């Protein structure tokens, strides 16, 4: 596999191994091989489809793979064995597909609006031989009204999706009562969370915690905003595509 004209060397995933261990995640050799193959496919497809601006092996290990795995710090351990996860706005599979590699017992649904990206996800699913992965092409505002998916998940994941007031409307409808939403954010989210209070409550959620991660291997400071679903989401939400961001509650 080549990256342009340069040979890609993925022989040494030390950053991934050490960083995962710091998160309490121990990857075996087969899983490390899957992450290497993930990277090679990402680089190959990225030459044709705009998947990510992060292309170097070292940065992919930290800013994509480890950043994805950091959500485990907010997930109840029992759900990492057989929980139902949905990744809203999955893009190139972060964090949902990376989490599936590390925890093969979970069931993961990846929702992505761009068909070229879901084509990559389907290819990657087959290439890595990952069972219990469903891939849905569509906008979350529409997909969340599908009764097969609505309020059907233990954990809803969102990475770089939207501001919290819009994110609440795009994610909480997928979450079962008693389940959680984990939003990956940059360091300073206090004002964003305060402004989202009404939207979170309207969608049937409450703020459980804001967890700041101080793990050197992550390279950049990450904050996990964790919402808990305590009541069903009213049927009218989410509103039509674009409305949550244009006119947040």
Image (tube, rainbow, N blue to C red):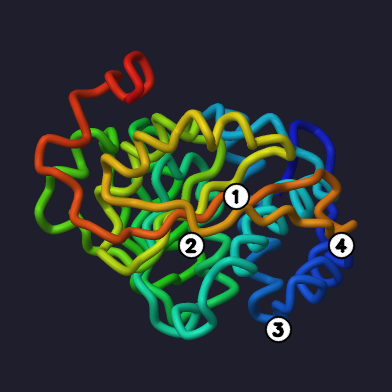
Left or right: residue 72 versus residue 136 is: right
Quarter of the image for residue 169 reads top left
> Residue 17: percent from the left, percent from the top?
81, 71
Give the CA separation, mark 2 to mark 4.
Answer: 24 Å
- Marks 2/1 in contact by CB < 8 Å: the verdict is yes
Check disc 2: other Cα within 10 Å, few if <14, some if 14-19, many if 20+. few
Q: Which marked residue is nearer to the observer: mark 1 or mark 4?
A: 4
> Quarter of the image holding residue 132?
bottom left
Verify CB contact (< 8 Å) between mark 3 and mark 1.
no
**For mark 2, what is the residue?**
127
Spatial CA span between label 3 and label 4: 14 Å
Dot 2 or dot 4, earlier in sequence:
4
The residues bearing labels 3 and 2 have C-alpha atoms spaced at a distance of 18 Å
* Circle number at residue 41: 1
Report the front residue among 150 and 4: 150
For the point 54% across and 43% down, which residue is it?
159
Give the mark, 3 or 2, whose residue is nearer the N terminus.
3
**Pointer 3 residue:** 28
Q: Which residue is mark 4?
A: 15
* Quadrant of image for the C terminus: top left
């Amino acid at each position: 596999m080549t990256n342009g004209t340069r040979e890609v060397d993925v022989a040494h995933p030390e950053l991934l191994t050490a960083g995962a261990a710091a998160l309490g995640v121990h990857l075996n050799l087969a899983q490390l091989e899957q992450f290497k193959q993930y990277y090679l496919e990402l680089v190959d497809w990225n030459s044709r489809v705009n998947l990510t601006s992060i292309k170097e092996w070292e940065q992919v290990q930290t800013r994509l793979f480890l950043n994805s795995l950091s959500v485990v710090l907010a997930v109840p351990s029992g759900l990492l064995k057989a929980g139902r996860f949905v990744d809203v706005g999955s893009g190139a599979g972060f964090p949902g597909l990376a989490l599936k590699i590390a925890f093969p017992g979970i069931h993961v649904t990846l929702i992505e609006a761009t068909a070229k990206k879901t084509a990559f996800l389907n290819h990657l699913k087959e290439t890595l031989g990952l069972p219990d992965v469903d891939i849905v092409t569509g906008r979350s505002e529409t997909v969340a009204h599908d009764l097969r998916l609505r309020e059907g998940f233990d954990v809803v994941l969102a990475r770089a999706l939207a501001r919290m007031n819009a994110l609440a409307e795009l994610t909480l409808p997928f979450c079962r009562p008693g389940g959680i939403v984990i939003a990956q954010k940059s360091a300073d989210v206090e004002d964003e969370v305060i402004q989202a209070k009404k939207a979170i409550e309207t969608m049937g959620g409450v703020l459980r915690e804001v967890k700041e991660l101080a793990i050197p291997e992550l390279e950049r400071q990450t904050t996990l905003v964790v919402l808990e679903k305590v009541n069903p989401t009213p049927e009218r939400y989410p509103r039509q595509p674009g409305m949550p961001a244009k006119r947040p509650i």
